[in-house]
C-alpha cells in the first residue's frame, strides 16, 4: 500500500536531481535543473503568485468558515439541518463545472481575469475545507467551559476571547493550512481564471510540460511538494506546542 | 426573610410541555449547607441552573439578600458553580484557572495570586499552581474546581453532583472536606445530588424533590425518621412500609389483626426502619426468615410476617444475627416510638 502510494513521488524526486536532459534516463547527480528553474523569472513570478493567492484565499476562507461555524453554535435557526451539508456540498461538485461557472459569472459581471478574481474563486472553494475542520472541533467542544467562564464573571465577549477562541485555535490553524495547500495545488480553476500576469505554479508546470518533459518539471514539482509538506509540519508543530 | 428566597418558581423548557419545576419555594439561610436531593429528572439540576443564571424560569422570583437576581446575567451574579464535569479550562495552568474569576473582575495581579494561593491551600493543593489540568487526577481536578469557585468568595456556592465522578473512597474523603471547607469559609452551599447517603452525611437541611415539586424539606433526621410521604421514606435509606387500619378501640393493627402499639383513627401507612427491628423471643411480631444477606458488620434479613402478605427487612449486627438461618421462625421486637405514620 505504502509502496503504491509513494513510489511515483520517490521517482519524481530522484529524477529532479538527474544530470541529463531526459526525465527518465539517469545520468548522474546534479542540481543543474534546480539552478535553471530558480533563475527563471517566470518561475519566480509564478511562485509569488501562488503564495499570494494561497495566503489571501486561506485567510479569507478560514475567517468566513470560523464565523459560519460560530453562527451555527448559538440558537438553532430554521433550516439549519440543510445548511451545514450545503456548506460542504461544493466539495463534490466537479471542479471543471465550478471553473466554467465561475468564469462565465466573472465575465458577466465584468471581473477581469487576474489576481483578484483568482483570490475570490480560491476563497470560495477553500471555505468547505476550513469549515469542516473547524466545525468538527466545535462539535466536540464542551460548552460547559463557556458556562464556567460566564459563571466566573466573564461576559460573552471576554468568554469568547479568553476561552472559546483559544480552544478553537488549533482547528482554525489546521483549517488555514488545509485551505492553503488546497489553493496552492489547484489547477483547473486557476487555469480558467488566471490572466497572463497571474500564472500560478501548477499552470507554469503545465506550460513547461508542453515544451517537453525535462527534469526541470521534476524540480518544480519537488519544490511544490516540499512547500506543502513544510506547511503541514509547521501546523503539526504549532499544534504540539499548544498542547503543552 | 432568608438569605436566598426562591418563590413559586416554575419552569418548562422552550418548545416542550413538560413542567420541569412546579411552584417550588425554598428559603436558604446564610452559612447553610443545603442539599437538593432527588432521582434524575426531578428538576434539581434545573433549579441549580436557575440559581446560577444559565436558565431563566418561566415564572417565579428568586432573591439573594433581598435583591431580585433573575435579571442579573451569570457573569454579574455573586454566585459561583462547581460543575459536575469540573469544566477546568484545559489551556490554562491551575493558577490561571483559579485566578480566572478574579481577573475578570479586575482584581490586581498580586491580590488575585494571594487569593488563589489561599484557595489552593484550603483545598490542600498548594504546589500545583503551575501544572496543567490534564496533569491532575480526577480528585485533584475536583479540588481545583472548588478552589476556582471559592477564590471569588461567592455569597452562594452551587455544587452540581461534584462527587459523582469519584470512586467510593475518594468520595467519602471529599464529603468530609466539603463540610470542613463550608464551615471554614462560612459560605452558603447549595449541593445537588441523587445520593441520599451523601445528602444525609453533609447537609444542614435537605430538600427532597420529585418530578419538579418539593416532597419534603428538613434536617437529615427529619427526613430520615419522619418522612412526609412513601416516596421520601423509600428514597432515603431502606424502610418497611406497613398498611395498618384502626380497630374498634382505635389501635392501629396489621391486616392479620396484630396491634402495632400505636393509636390512629384512619387507615395509615406505618414506617419502621430495618435497624429499629430486632430479633427477640418476646417480640410483638412473628414470622419466618425468607432471605439473609451478610455484609460484614451487619446482616440483613427478610422476614415474612405471619398472618399477612407483609415482608419486612431487618438489620442486625452480625453478632446478634449469629445462629439464625433461613426458614427459622423468629419474633421481632421494636420500640413503638420508632414507628412513624407517613401522612395518610
Image (cartoon, coloured by chain):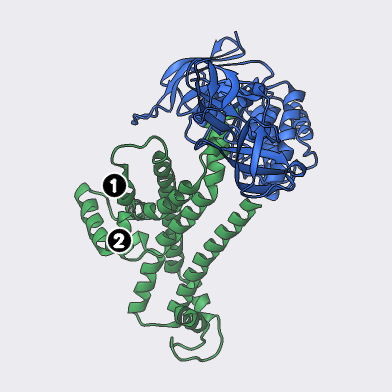
Chain colours: A green, B blue
Report x, y in % for residue A84. 34, 48
Name the residue: 41% across, 47% down: A65
Residue in front for this viewpoint, A211 or A1: A1
Residue at label 2? A92
Residue in front for this viewpoint, B203 or B89: B203
What numbered label is drawn on residue B166? none
Name the residue: 25% across, 55% down: A102
The disc numbered 2 marks a residue on which chain? A
Extreme-top residue of the structure: B1
Residue B310, above or below A13: above
Q: CA distance from mark 2 to mark 1?
A: 16 Å
Callout count: 2
Q: Nearer the viewer, mark 2 or mark 1?
A: 1
Task: State if disc 1 and disc 2 touch (CB < 8 Å).
Answer: no
Dot 2: element: helix
Quarter location, residue A153: top right
Quarter location, residue A205: bottom left
The disc numbered 1 marks a residue on which chain? A
Quarter location, residue B174: top right
Report x, y in % for residue A134. 45, 50
Residue B338, above or below B248: below
Q: Quadrant of the N terminus of chain B?
A: top right
What numbered label is drawn on residue A82? 1
Amino acid at each position: 500500500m505504502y509502496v503504491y502510494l509513494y513510489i511515483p513521488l520517490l521517482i519524481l524526486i530522484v529524477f529532479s536531481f538527474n544530470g541529463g536532459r531526459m526525465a527518465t534516463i539517469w545520468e548522474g547527480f546534479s542540481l543543474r535543473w534546480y539552478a535553471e528553474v530558480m533563475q527563471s523569472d517566470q518561475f519566480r513570478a509564478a511562485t509569488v503568485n501562488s503564495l499570494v493567492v494561497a495566503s489571501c484565499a486561506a485567510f479569507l476562507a478560514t475567517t468566513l468558515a470560523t464565523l459560519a461555524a460560530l453562527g451555527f453554535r448559538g440558537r438553532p435557526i430554521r433550516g439549519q439541518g440543510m445548511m451545514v451539508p450545503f456548506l460542504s456540498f461544493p466539495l463534490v461538485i466537479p471542479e471543471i463545472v465550478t471553473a466554467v461557472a465561475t468564469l462565465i459569472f466573472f465575465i458577466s459581471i465584468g471581473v477581469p481575469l487576474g489576481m483578484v478574481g483568482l483570490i475570490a474563486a480560491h476563497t470560495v472553494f477553500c471555505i468547505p475545507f476550513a469549515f469542516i475542520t473547524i466545525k468538527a472541533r466545535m462539535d466536540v467542544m464542551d460548552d460547559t467551559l463557556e458556562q464556567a467562564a460566564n459563571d466566573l464573571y466573564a461576559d460573552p465577549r471576554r468568554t469568547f476571547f479568553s476561552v472559546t477562541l483559544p480552544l478553537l485555535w488549533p482547528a482554525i490553524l489546521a483549517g488555514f493550512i488545509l485551505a492553503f495547500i488546497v489553493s496552492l495545488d489547484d489547477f483547473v480553476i486557476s487555469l480558467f481564471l488566471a490572466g497572463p500576469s497571474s500564472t500560478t505554479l501548477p499552470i507554469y508546470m503545465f506550460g513547461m510540460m508542453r515544451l517537453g518533459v525535462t527534469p526541470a518539471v521534476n524540480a518544480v514539482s519537488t519544490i511544490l511538494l516540499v512547500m506543502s509538506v513544510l506547511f503541514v509540519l509547521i501546523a503539526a508543530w504549532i499544534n504540539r506546542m499548544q498542547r503543552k | 426573610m432568608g438569605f436566598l428566597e426562591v418563590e413559586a418558581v416554575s419552569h418548562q423548557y422552550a418548545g416542550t410541555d413538560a413542567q420541569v419545576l412546579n411552584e417550588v419555594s425554598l428559603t436558604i439561610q446564610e452559612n447553610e449547607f443545603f442539599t437538593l436531593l432527588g432521582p434524575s429528572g426531578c428538576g434539581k439540576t434545573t433549579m441549580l441552573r436557575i440559581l446560577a443564571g444559565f436558565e431563566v424560569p418561566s415564572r417565579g422570583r428568586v432573591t439573594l439578600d433581598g435583591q431580585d437576581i433573575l435579571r442579573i446575567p451569570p457573569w454579574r451574579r455573586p454566585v459561583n458553580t462547581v460543575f459536575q464535569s469540573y469544566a477546568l479550562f484545559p489551556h490554562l495552568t491551575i493558577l490561571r484557572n483559579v485566578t480566572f474569576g478574579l481577573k475578570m473582575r479586575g482584581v490586581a495581579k498580586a491580590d488575585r495570586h494571594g487569593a488563589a494561593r489561599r484557595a489552593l491551600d484550603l483545598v490542600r493543593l498548594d504546589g500545583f499552581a503551575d501544572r496543567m489540568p490534564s496533569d491532575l487526577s480526577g480528585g485533584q481536578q475536583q479540588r481545583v474546581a472548588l478552589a476556582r469557585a471559592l477564590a471569588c468568595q461567592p455569597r452562594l456556592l452551587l455544587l452540581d453532583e461534584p462527587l459523582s465522578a469519584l470512586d467510593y473512597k475518594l468520595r467519602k474523603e471529599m464529603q468530609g472536606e466539603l463540610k470542613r471547607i463550608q464551615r471554614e469559609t462560612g459560605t452558603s452551599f447549595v449541593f445537588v445530588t441523587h445520593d441520599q447517603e451523601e445528602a444525609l452525611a453533609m447537609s444542614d437541611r435537605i430538600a427532597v424533590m420529585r418530578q419538579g415539586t418539593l416532597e419534603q424539606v428538613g434536617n437529615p433526621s427529619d427526613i430520615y425518621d419522619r418522612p412526609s410521604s412513601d416516596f421520601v421514606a423509600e428514597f432515603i435509606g431502606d424502610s418497611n412500609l406497613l398498611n395498618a387500619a384502626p380497630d374498634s378501640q382505635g389501635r392501629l393493627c396489621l391486616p392479620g389483626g396484630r396491634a402495632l402499639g400505636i393509636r390512629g383513627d384512619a387507615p395509615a401507612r406505618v414506617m419502621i426502619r430495618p435497624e429499629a427491628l430486632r430479633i427477640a423471643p418476646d417480640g410483638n411480631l412473628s414470622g419466618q426468615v425468607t432471605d439473609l444477606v451478610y455484609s460484614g458488620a451487619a446482616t440483613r434479613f427478610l422476614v415474612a410476617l405471619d398472618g399477612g402478605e407483609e415482608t419486612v427487612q431487618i438489620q442486625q449486627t452480625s453478632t446478634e444475627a449469629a445462629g439464625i438461618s433461613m426458614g427459622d421462625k423468629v419474633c421481632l421486637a421494636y420500640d413503638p416510638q420508632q414507628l412513624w405514620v407517613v401522612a395518610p
